[in-house]
Amino acid sequence: MKNCLITGGTSGLGIELVKVFLTNNYFVHIIGKNRKKFDIFTQNIDVELKKKVLFYEIDLSEIQNIKNSFDKIKIININVLINNAGIINLNKTLNSMNLEETFVVNYLSHYYLTNKLIESSSIVKKGVIVNISSFTHIFSNMDFKNIDLKKNYNGWFAYFNTKLMNILFTYKCNNIFKEIKSIVINPGWMNTNFGNNNKSKLRNFISFLRNMFSKDPKGVAQKIYAIIDYDNISKNDCYYIVNKKKKSSAFSHKQEVQNILWKKSEELLRNEKF
């Protein structure tokens, strides 16, 4: 039996990934903040599958939550880590660290969790890390002096920036971690409830279009599962649109930018004494 840890695994693409890994003989560990959603999910699955899924109630907008629960997580021998959790806040929302929540949930929490798991040897040799990005990374306007856009906040750019960060983070991981491989996946536009926490005429129009033209997350999850094979993953060619290898933006391949983001992330966490 192998272990898969999925953040944001109670809805959308996350819950479909949980189902795929469960039916392929994995123990699945879910990180999420909504236990009620998890309980509803387990009520509707086979008794034997229930034995193979565990839930960790963690709010990824608060790094302290991860730290407080880490002793429970680090005992897992993780074969696949999927950093899937993501949000978009069109209105600026700050956490207790005075950091913008989109930045923390989509990127910084995953940076922290991934590094802690590697430091504790919880991710096994020949393990795979999957980070979720988006084609919107090409619209990023990232400014390291205003990394979480507390100044001149724009919710769309806050989201775009984190999708670029996830790509930069993936490439940096492949440079420094020898026996672990990372891939970054743009799953495309899916028919989920993502972003429905925001209320606006534009948001309503996007939701209308999504219902008509977006992808089924179940099919996307199945395709993602099919490419998670350590031996077939290339560290130098690791950006996918669903299951097809593609090229991310030229900017995302700049090693100096990858290094600056890594250093900035370290500094933020060090200043908060994590």
Image (cartoon, rainbow, N blue to C red):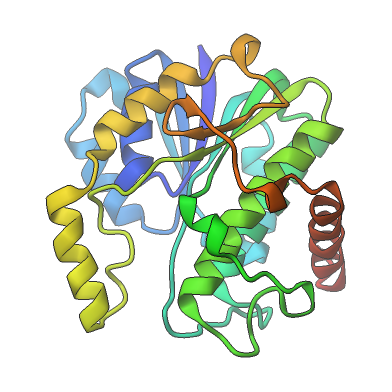
Q: Residue furthest front?
A: 250
Q: Is residue 183 above or below residue 209?
A: above
Residue ID at (42%, 33%): 242
Q: Position of residue 39 (x, y in %)?
A: 27, 46
Can you tell which quarter of the image residue 77 is in? top right
Residue nearest the viewer, comparing 103 with 117: 103
Residue nearest the viewer, comparing 257 with 68: 257
Q: Position of residue 169 (x, y in %)?
A: 71, 47
Q: Position of residue 182 (x, y in %)?
A: 66, 31
Q: Is residue 118 above or below residue 20?
A: below
Q: Is residue 233 above or below residue 87?
A: above
Q: Is residue 233 left or right of residue 39?
A: right
Q: Position of residue 272 (x, y in %)?
A: 81, 72
Residue ID at (37%, 24%): 223
Residue ID at (87%, 66%): 267
Evaluate whether residue 167 shows in this view.
yes
Q: Is residue 162 left or right of residue 9?
A: right
Evaluate whether residue 120 shows in this view.
no
Q: Is residue 156 left or right of residue 47?
A: right
Q: How many marks?
A: 0
Q: Residue furthest bottom?
A: 152
Residue ID at (42%, 27%): 224
Q: Quadrant of the C terminus?
A: bottom right
